[in-house]
Amino acid sequence: MTHASETTRAGSTPARVVLAFDLDGPTGEAMVSGKIWQRPGYFALGAYGPHRAVPRILDVLRGHRVAATFFTPAWVARTWPELCRRILAEGHEMAGHGDRHEKFYGRGRDDQADILRRSQQSFRDVLGHRALGFRAPSGDLAPETPELLAEHGYTYSSSMRGGDQPYRYAGVPLVEIPAKSLFDDYSVFAYHRAPDFPSGLDRIAPYRPAFRSWAEEVEAAAEEGLTVSTIWHPKVIGTPGRTVLMDEFIGGLVDRDDVRVMRADEVAAEHGAVSAV
């Protein structure tokens, strides 16, 4: 995959922060393999996101009058349709995240296309329109995935980790909005038992230092006019204690004159992505 060079306009424009939530629910490899249906506790761990965490997160976003993007597997949209329609009704963006959170790298072209086709159809059925945005589960884009995304009506991706500014793919009408792994709440807050995941993570980080490190990254991004996107998961970041600090973090963003809080589709539109659905 190739892309055009980025341009950094230090100090000339505000930084852009996309509050992006990966609304996975219980989808993922265990659902793709079918093992989750023998693990009710594991299912419940994922279902905490749409069942309990998202309403709490929506309250925080509404309190600060900011809009976010929810990258959502189509299975979640079909299973919690009223919640997903509420997200839209409150001014947020619903974007694609596979059907059941399938990894795309190493998957055949026809299989990828079928996942994208079914996902877009579910969005039309449940939400009334297709998704414009897509985030590859685990950031695993295959070389042919950008072309397939464009063919199935997506105008931007937020999957890759290698940039500070959005860019356009060479030869494909698709914008990429990079999102760094350091803004992934799994890296600091997620530790699941049976199975142990993420592998090798032996403790959960203290809450306040984690949010402080994210605020420091935004501070530096504001100095250079960069674009930042979170990789937050409601089932991870949406617990009562973490939501309190998320509320403070977002409040700090809103108070800054050198930061704009935007939906991902709004950022993509500024880089030439088609915004009509």
Image: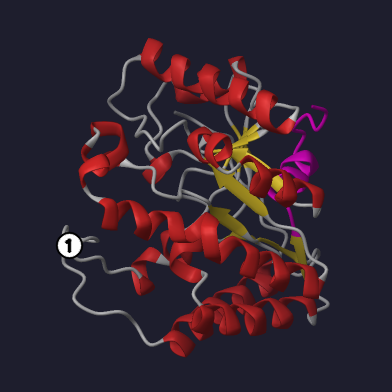
Q: Is residue 275 left or right of residue 34?
A: right
Magenta stretch? 262-277
In the foreground, 223 or 238: 238
Q: Which x, y percent locates residue 234?
A: 51, 62
Q: Quadrant of the C terminus?
A: top right
Q: Which x, y percent locates residue 239?
A: 49, 75
Q: Quadrant of residue 42?
A: bottom left
* Residue 232 in sight here: no
* Residue 244 in sight here: yes
Q: Is residue 118 above or below residue 18?
A: above
Mark 1 residue element: loop
Query: Within the magenta stretch, is there residue 83?
Result: no
Q: Is residue 224 above or below residue 38?
A: below
Quick one: label 1, few (<14), some, or many (20+) residues within 10 Å? few
Q: Which x, y percent locates residue 258?
A: 79, 74
- Residue at x 60% of width, y 14% of height: 151
- Residue at x 67% of width, y 68% of height: 224
Residue linked to disc 1:
196
Color encoding of the figure: secondary structure
